[in-house]
């Protein structure tokens, strides 16, 4: 298949969240912002089971689409334009926190902090797994790490 095949185009649009990931500056941050906005919308407007189902389906589709995208760009790296993983990882703390303005801000800040720094075990996953599972898993770990910090802050404040 050529890089202009329908499947590649769909995978590119999905992985880059409609080309948001192609922005020159801070594509991961933009992907996280989209994740916060969409997560808040879905969590506030639909039953929680629907929210879980949507995020689960996005994860499954992402595993497939990232593999297609990586194959077509002939690389097994976590390219900066792939931002669907930030979208997914951002859902972890967002799902579990009470939706206050401060918690939502913490959700964004701490997720980005852990996603950028890749604190263990995210750094291990990032180094060892270059496929779609690794690309998504390190962001899931960053989301869990952010959630723990937010939980601790809420516990002691």
Image (cartoon, grey):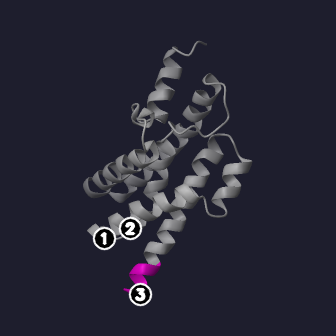
- Mark 3 and mark 1 in contact (Cβ < 8 Å)? no
Residue 154: say if magenta. Answer: yes
The answer to which of 30 and 50 lies nearer the viewer is 30
| Stretch of the chain drawn in magenta | 152-157
Question: Residue at position x 47%, y 57% from top?
Answer: 112
Question: Label 2 crowding class (10 Å Cα cut-off): few <14, some 14-19, many 20+?
Answer: many
Distance of label 2 from label 1 (alpha carbons): 6 Å
Q: How many marks?
A: 3
Q: Secondary structure at mark 3?
A: helix
Query: Chief secondary structure of the magenta span?
Result: helix
Above or below for 134 versus 2 = below
Quadrant occupied by the C terminus = bottom left
Nearer-N-terminus badge (1/3): 1
Position of residue 45 in the picture relative to residue 94 (left or right):
left
Above or below for 156 versus 145 = below
Question: Residue at position x 49%, y 17% from top?
Answer: 6
Q: Which mark is residue 31?
A: none
Q: Which mark is residue 102?
A: 1
Residue 146: say if magenta. Answer: no
């Amino acid at each position: 298949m050529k890089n202009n095949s329908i499947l590649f185009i769909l995978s590119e649009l999905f992985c880059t969240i409609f080309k948001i990931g192609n922005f020159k500056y801070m594509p991961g941050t933009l992907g996280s912002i989209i994740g916060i906005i969409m997560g808040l919308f879905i969590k506030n407007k639909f039953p929680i089971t629907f929210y879980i189902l949507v995020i689960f389906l996005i994860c499954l589709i992402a595993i497939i689409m990232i593999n297609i995208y990586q194959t077509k760009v002939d690389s097994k790296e976590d390219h900066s334009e792939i931002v669907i993983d930030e979208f997914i990882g951002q859902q972890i703390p967002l799902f579990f926190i009470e939706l206050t303005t401060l918690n939502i801000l913490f959700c964004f800040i701490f997720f980005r902090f852990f996603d950028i720094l890749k604190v263990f075990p995210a750094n291990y996953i990032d180094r060892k797994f270059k496929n779609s599972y690794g690309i998504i898993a390190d962001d899931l770990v960053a989301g869990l790490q952010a959630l723990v910090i937010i939980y601790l802050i809420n516990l002691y404040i």
